[in-house]
Image (cartoon, rainbow, N blue to C red):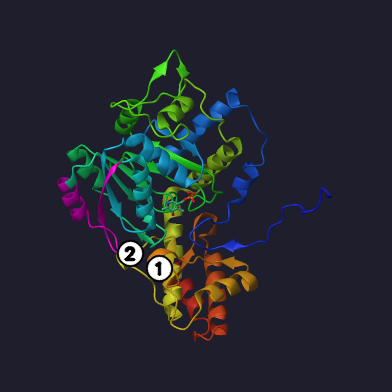
Amino acid sequence: MTPDLFGEIDPPQRLLMGPGPVNAHPRVLRAMSADLLGQFDPEMTAYMNQVMALYRPVFGTANRWTFLIDGTARSAIEASLISLVAPGDTVLVVDFGRFGLLLTEILERIGAVIETVSAPWGQVVPLADIETAIARTRPKVVATVHGDTSTTMAQPLAGLGDLCRISGALSYVDATATLGGMAMQADTWGLDVVTGGLQKCLGGPSGSAPITISDAAAERIFSRRHVEKGIRRDDIVDGSGVRIGSNYFDLAMIMDYWSDKRLNHHTEATTMLYGARECARVALGEGLEARFARHAAAGRAVVAGARAMGLTVFGDDAHRMTNVTGILIPEGVDGERVRARMREDFEIEIGAAFGPLQGKIWRIGAMGYNAMKHKVLITLGALESVLRAEGFAVPAGAGVDAALEAWGA
Ligand SMILES: *Cc1c(COP(=O)(O)O)cnc(C)c1O
């Protein structure tokens, strides 16, 4: 076998306009090629502290506990729930799509008592319904998703924290798909634990998950740990003596590692940390408000472009995510053939869908480094060409013209 058997990694230059991952910002990729450091090297721990400082404004928080989980976004979801929720605790899941269901699946494994308040796919859950459900179920934790990419809907979060506080519940929010692209005000909205990922609006690769934790939630998490003589042991129990079901995702242990104690847990993923650090620097350098406006312009342009092409946009207009748009696959058009042609002829990836929306919609994302005018216009122009080739009559140029106009100045 020659060492060259498979060749160097040299992927095609695809434009990733689906629900994530998206193309990483070149600055992030450059940061990730920097040399490695030992995990307790003062330079490395200084970078860790910088990451904590950089992600506070990204989450809209002053929370001391703002750091990274090593893993994809799902790892931070699991770490949060497994560390906050003990077996037998009641958790209210505010569910309006696939990622609400994921919260339920993780909570089932924990042995939580799960209550749900849901909305049909394509809508969000009214705050009044959440209030009623909290009063009815008296949960210890209320868990929800900010932007659910499966349905392209964004759940309004203002007011949720107050409802939780009044009833003594902690809140958890999966903001993977919106962080860095839509406003996140963890402190103003009174949210306790919020988690993200890099490969959506933050414009990095998947594999690192930012998290922020309020003091109240940190207290709950630390109340379940046991430290002896500065040595962490795998004997983390909750008040009832039940072991926390994960060592890797035990937030108390991870927080001891990110604290001045630097108690060894895992080896911090150096290269991912460099990437996450640069994602936040890029976002803050642009300015969060400007960044949200850019994602909003991209979303408006995709919606206007799709409608001008005679396509129907999926879901409730009032609660649309700005960064991912669902478009109904027209009658008689083969959705997968369209996606294949987009990829093969134009090097553009758009998303399919799953669950009840499988085969019914495409999902076009414009996030992070890809929420740019020219990338949206190129995608719509390509879609027009492909739709025409597939026999769906599209008025020539209408989608691109409408998108350009909707983008604004
Ligand atoms: C993409 C996404 C995830 C999953 O992220 P991974 O990095 O693949 O684990 C979780 N939640 C939401 C809302 C997402 O959009």
Q: Quadrant of residue 162?
A: top left
Give the magenta range.
112-136
Considering only vertical position in the picture, is 374 above or below 66? below
Badge 1 marks a residue whose secondary structure is helix
* Residue picked out by circle 2: 121
Distance CA(mark 2)–CA(mark 1): 8 Å
Q: Is residue 348 magenta?
A: no
Residue 328 horizontal/vertical position (percent): 42, 74
Label 2: few (<14), some (14–19) or many (≥20) C-alpha neighbours in 10 Å:
many
* Residue picked out by circle 1: 357
Marks 2,1: beta carbons within 8 A: yes
Left/right placement of residue 190 relative to residue 269 reads left
Q: Quadrant of residue 42?
A: top right
Question: Measuring 62% from the left and 42% from the top, which residue is drawn there?
Answer: 31
As shown in the figure, which amino acid type bears the numbered disc 1?
Leu
Q: Is residue 124 magenta?
A: yes
